[in-house]
Image: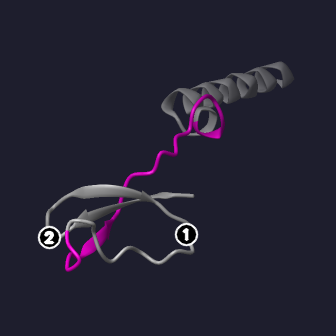
Amino acid sequence: MPIYEYACETCGEDFEVLQKMSEPPLKRHECSPKSSVKRKMSRTAFQLKGGGWYSEGYSSGGSSKSSSAGSSSSGAACGGGG
């Protein structure tokens, strides 16, 4: 179940609520029966760690290694055949 962040427009408090995705958003805060709340956009905790397609194919270190390796093997093939 995701954790949603809310901000109370009456008292200004920021709080988090553990809710199912199918549940409707909160409308009131405990500070007052007339309070109103807004759901906030929050950061995700998703991170890519370790090696993989990004570090090998898109980082500056990975692309220079593959291009230099490709040019040396191409040069060897051309030099050996001619």
Calculate the distance from the C-alpha at mark 2 to the C-alpha at mark 1.
Answer: 25 Å
Number of marks drawn: 2
Which residues are the magenta region?
A: 32-54
* Residue at 41% across, 75% down: 25
Residue 11 image point, x, y percent: 14, 64
Mark closer to the chain start, 2 or 1: 2
Give the residue at mark 2: 10
Label 2 secondary element: loop
Q: Is residue 27 above or below residue 73?
A: below
Identified at 76% across, 20% down, the residue is: 76
Q: Which marked residue is nearer to the observer: mark 2 or mark 1?
A: 2
Mark 1 secondary-structure assignment: loop
Residue 21 disc label: 1
- Predominant SS of the magenta segment: loop
Around disc 1, counting alpha carbons within 10 Å, would you say few (fewer than 14), some (14 to 19), or many (20 or more)?
A: few
Rendered image quadrant of residue 21: bottom right
Residue 52 appears left or right of 18? right
Q: Is residue 22 left or right of residue 38?
A: right
Q: Nearer the viewer, residue 33 or 58?
A: 33
Q: Identify the amino acid type marked 2.
A: Thr
